[in-house]
Image: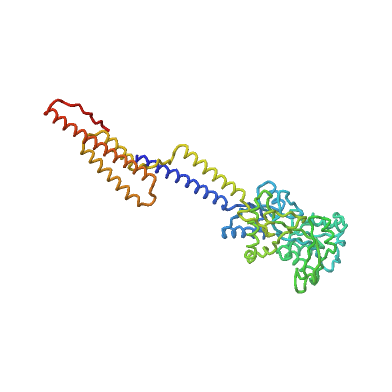
C-alpha cells in the first residue's frame, strides 16, 4: 500500500511540474513575442544624399540604444519611387514630397524638411517680380526628374503666367556659374533649404557671375493666398542673410512658396511601433544633429483635426502625450490570457480528478493491524498467542499516543483506532474468559470420571 501511495504522489508531482513548466514556457514565449524588436523597412535615396546619411545614422543609433524598433534600409531613386514602395507594401517608412506623390496608404510621422522656392537673378537683369519672367530662360536646380520644373510651372500659373512663355531648364548646382557666364540662363530657381550644399553652391555661382556680386532675390508677397489655393504649397519665410551675411542676402526677410518633405509610415503599421519610432526619432535628433545638421530640420507635424496632412495615430499619441501604456495597449489580450489560463487550469484539474491522477487515499495507519489482530483473537485457543496479541495492542496504543504530539495529527483517525483497540481488548478478555471456563470444565470431567457417573454440563461456546 505504501509503494502504491508513493507512486501516485510521484505521478502527481510530475503532472504539477509539467503544468508549471508549460505555463512558464508560455509566459516566456509571450514575453519574448511582446518585447522582440520590430524591424521597419525604410525606403530612402538617392544613395549619398544628406537624407540617406541621416537615416543610416538613425539606424545605427537605434541598434546601439537597443530600441524595440529597428530599421532596415532599401534604396529609392526618388520621392515618387519611395511613395510607390509604400503603396506596394515594400516599405514601412519613407520620405515623400507633398507635391510629387503622397501615398494614400501612408500617414505622416514628422516633417522631414521644408523646401522654399527662391527666385534669384543678377540685379542688372531687371528681374524683380515673377511676372518679369516671360521671355526669359530660367535655370531650375535639379536634373532628370522634372519634379522641380513642374513645381515652378505651378507657381507661374498662380502668378497668371503661361508656363510656355518661360523657358525652364534643369541645371545642376555646380553648373550655375558657368550657365550665367555663357548667358544660357537669366535667372535661377533654387528649391531647398538655404543651408544645404546644393542650394548654397547654386547661389554661390549666381553671386560669382553677377556684376559686382549684386543679386536680386524675388519675394512672393501673395504666398499665403496661393498656398490656400494649392494644397501642396505652403507659405515659407526666407530669413534675412540666409544666402550670405556680408552683405546680407537678402537684406530683410520675405515670404515665398515652398513644399514639404514628410516622413510617412504605412497605415498598416501598429500604433505601438510607430509611437516608439517617433519617440526615438525626436529623442535622438539632438545627438544626430552633431554629425548631421540636417536633423535639426525635422519638425513636429500639425496634429490638430482638419490639418492638411493626416498624422499616424501612433505618432499623434506620442506627440500629444496620449501614448498608451503597455496595459492599455494589450489589456484585452491580457484579460483573454487570464481567462484562458483560468479555464485551462480548471480543465486540467477536472481531467486529473476524473482519471484519479494524484488522488491520495487516506492513510489508515495501524487500524488494519488492529483488525487483523481481532480476527486472530477469534481464531486462537492458545493463551500465549493471546498474550502476544495483547502486547502488540499495547505497543500500537503507545505508538499512537506518541504520534498525537506531532503537527497535523488526525484526531478522527485516532478516535477510530482507540475504538478498535477497545474492541480488541474486550475480545481478548472474552476469549480468555471462555478458555478459562473450558479449562475448568475439562478438569471437572476428569474428576467426575474418576468418582462416578458422568454428569452432563453445558459446554462454553467459543466467542
Give whichever of 421, 275 is nearer the camera. 421
Relative to residue 400, is residue 233 depicted above or below?
A: below
Residue 324 location (% of width, % of height): 64, 55
Q: Going by the image, does 424 lie left or right of 455? A: right
Give whichever of 268, 160 is nearer the camera. 268
Residue 317 location (% of width, % of height): 68, 56
Q: Going by the image, does 4 lie left or right of 71? A: left
Where on the picture, by quarter, is residue 434? top left
Where on the picture, by quarter, is residue 199? bottom right
Task: Please give the name of the residue rendered at 78% of the width and 65% of the height, measured from the top-left corner.
Answer: 237
- Whether residue 181 appears in this view of the structure is no
Q: Quadrant of the N terminus?
A: top left
Task: Please give the name of the residue rendered at 52% of the width and 47% of the height, measured from the top-left corner.
Answer: 26
- Whether residue 285 appears in this view of the structure is yes
Task: Please give the name of the residue rendered at 52% of the width and 49% of the height, measured from the top-left corner.
Answer: 27
Q: Residue furthest top?
A: 453
Q: Going by the image, does 83 lie left or right of 131? A: left
Give whichever of 305, 188 is nearer the camera. 305
Q: Going by the image, does 286 lie left or right of 388? A: right
Q: Quadrant of the C terminus?
A: top left
Task: Please give the name of the residue rendered at 38% of the width and 49% of the height, measured from the top-left corner.
Answer: 409
Give whichever of 306, 40 is nearer the camera. 306
Relative to residue 364, is residue 55 depicted above or below?
A: below
Q: Colour scheme of this structure image? A: rainbow
Residue 232 location (% of width, % of height): 78, 55
Where on the picture, by quarter, is residue 229? bottom right
Amino acid at each position: 500500500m505504501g509503494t502504491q501511495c508513493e507512486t501516485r504522489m510521484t505521478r502527481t508531482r510530475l503532472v504539477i511540474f509539467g503544468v508549471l513548466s508549460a505555463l512558464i514556457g508560455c509566459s516566456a514565449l509571450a514575453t519574448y513575442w511582446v518585447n522582440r524588436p520590430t524591424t521597419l523597412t525604410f525606403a530612402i535615396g538617392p544613395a549619398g544624399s544628406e537624407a540617406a546619411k541621416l537615416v543610416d545614422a538613425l539606424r545605427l543609433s537605434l541598434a546601439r540604444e537597443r530600441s524595440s524598433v529597428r530599421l532596415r534600409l532599401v534604396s529609392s531613386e526618388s520621392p515618387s519611387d519611395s511613395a510607390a514602395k509604400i503603396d506596394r507594401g515594400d516599405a514601412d517608412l519613407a520620405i515623400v514630397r507633398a507635391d510629387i506623390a503622397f501615398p494614400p496608404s501612408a500617414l505622416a510621422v514628422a516633417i522631414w524638411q521644408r523646401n522654399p522656392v527662391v527666385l534669384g537673378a543678377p540685379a542688372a537683369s531687371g528681374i524683380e517680380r515673377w511676372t518679369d519672367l516671360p521671355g526669359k530662360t530660367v535655370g531650375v536646380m535639379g536634373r532628370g526628374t522634372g519634379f522641380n520644373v513642374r513645381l515652378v510651372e505651378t507657381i507661374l500659373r498662380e502668378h497668371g503666367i503661361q508656363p510656355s512663355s518661360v523657358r525652364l531648364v534643369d541645371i545642376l548646382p555646380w553648373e550655375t556659374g558657368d550657365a550665367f557666364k555663357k548667358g544660357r540662363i537669366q535667372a535661377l530657381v533654387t528649391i531647398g533649404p538655404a543651408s544645404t550644399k546644393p542650394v548654397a553652391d547654386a547661389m554661390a555661382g549666381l553671386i560669382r557671375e553677377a556684376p559686382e556680386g549684386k543679386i536680386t532675390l524675388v519675394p512672393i508677397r501673395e504666398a499665403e493666398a496661393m498656398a490656400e489655393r494649392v494644397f501642396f504649397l505652403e507659405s515659407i519665410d526666407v530669413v534675412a542673410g540666409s544666402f550670405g551675411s556680408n552683405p546680407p542676402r537678402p537684406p530683410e526677410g520675405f515670404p515665398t512658396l515652398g513644399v514639404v518633405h514628410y516622413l510617412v509610415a504605412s497605415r498598416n503599421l501598429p500604433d505601438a511601433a510607430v509611437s516608439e519610432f517617433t519617440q526615438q526619432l525626436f529623442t535622438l535628433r539632438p545627438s544626430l544633429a552633431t554629425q548631421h545638421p540636417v536633423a535639426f530640420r525635422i519638425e513636429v507635424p500639425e496634429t490638430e483635426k482638419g490639418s492638411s496632412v493626416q498624422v499616424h495615430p501612433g505618432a499623434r499619441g506620442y506627440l500629444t502625450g496620449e501614448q498608451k501604456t503597455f496595459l492599455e495597449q494589450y489589456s484585452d489580450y491580457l484579460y483573454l490570457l487570464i481567462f484562458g489560463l483560468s479555464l485551462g487550469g480548471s480543465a486540467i484539474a477536472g481531467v486529473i480528478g476524473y482519471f484519479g491522477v494524484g488522488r491520495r487515499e487516506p492513510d489508515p495507519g495501524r487500524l488494519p493491524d488492529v483488525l487483523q489482530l481481532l480476527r486472530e483473537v477469534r481464531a486462537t485457543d492458545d493463551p500465549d498467542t493471546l498474550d502476544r496479541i495483547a502486547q502488540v495492542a499495547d505497543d500500537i496504543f503507545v505508538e499512537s499516543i506518541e504520534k498525537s504530539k506531532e503537527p497535523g495529527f488526525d484526531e478522527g483517525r485516532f478516535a477510530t483506532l482507540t475504538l478498535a483497540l477497545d474492541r480488541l481488548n474486550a475480545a481478548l478478555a472474552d476469549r480468555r474468559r471462555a478458555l478459562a471456563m473450558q479449562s475448568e470444565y475439562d478438569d471437572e470431567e476428569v474428576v467426575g470420571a474418576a468418582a462416578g457417573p458422568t454428569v452432563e454440563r453445558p459446554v462454553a461456546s467459543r466467542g
